Amino acid sequence: MKIRFTETPGASAIAAALLALAMPAAAEVVPGPCGGDPHIACAVYDPTETYQITYRPGEVTVVVFEKGEKLDGGGMGDGKAWAAGPAGNGFFFKPKAVKAATNLILLTNRRRYVLHLLPVTKHEEAIWSLTFDYPDTRAKESAAAAARSAEARALLGQTRNTVGTGNFDYEMRGDTTLAPTALWDDGRFTYFEFRTSRDLPQIYRVFEDGSEGLVNPDDMRGPVLVVHDTAHRFNLRVGNAVLGIRNNAYRPDGRLNPLATTIPGTVRLVKQKEAIGE
């Protein structure tokens, strides 16, 4: 992608002088080091601010944009004194002259960046990389996290209500590494809770003739996978590993057996290698 630079008419020295008058240093943001290396600078993004970038002849600088942010265009007061161009989510520039002070405006698919390029003084270090912190992005992420938290709290409340009247009389045999951390049904739906970093197993309903049918749903509520059905038996599979599950209180008409909740909130595990048979 080639960036078309627009230049101010007149000599670069006049342009630089006018620029210095138009943008007093006191009104500009001077990025600080991100860590211990003064060449690696960071700043908080504000669309109303101008950011100073110090350069040294023979050294290149990159402005790194947010992930997914791409350059659309740009303008430079003295483009002839600079070699510049985009790469990925960054913009690189390098002075071709000793006296190359100018301004640089970059327009991306998300933001506008106003930069003031100045030569380093005797006691300064040139900025080689400038990265921004984006308050607008953090606000969106915070709002999304709050929404997820509210959804989780609502789900927890629903789950507690469901658990309080649910059937927990399940028996498991086989590879217990596939076992859910909680398992229950409400007479209509079956709830598999997986609080683990392992891959979720495939869930199969086992029919009366021994055949199986895949029942993995798209209904994932936080850590709880909801099967929109109940069954006498399920098999959970990952590769060659199998865990058989039997619902000891299963009723084809969907009505719960109240005696099935004598040990609420628990699942009985029987560690055997084979899946459950009839």
Image (cartoon, rainbow, N blue to C red):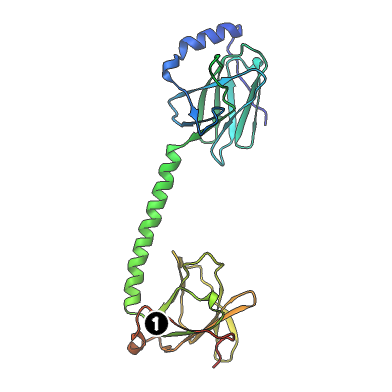
Q: How many marks?
A: 1
Residue found 42% across the figure and 18% down from its top: 27
Q: Residues within 10 Å of mark 1 (few under 14, many from 20)?
A: many
Where, quadrant-wise, is the C terminus in this rendering? bottom right
- Residue located beneath label 1 in the image: 168
In this rendering, is residue 105 above or below 210? above
Residue found 60% across the figure and 18% down from its top: 6
The image quarter containing residue 252 is: bottom left
Residue in front for this viewpoint, 272 or 29: 272
Q: Position of residue 161 (x, y in %)?
A: 32, 73
The image quarter containing residue 147 is: bottom left
Q: Position of residue 53 (x, y in %)?
A: 54, 22
Q: Position of residue 124 (x, y in %)?
A: 54, 19
Q: Is residue 86 left or right of residue 164?
A: right
Where, quadrant-wise, is the N terminus in this rendering? top right
Residue in front for this viewpoint, 135 or 207: 135
In this rendering, is residue 25 above or below 40? above
Residue found 53% across the figure and 38% down from its top: 66
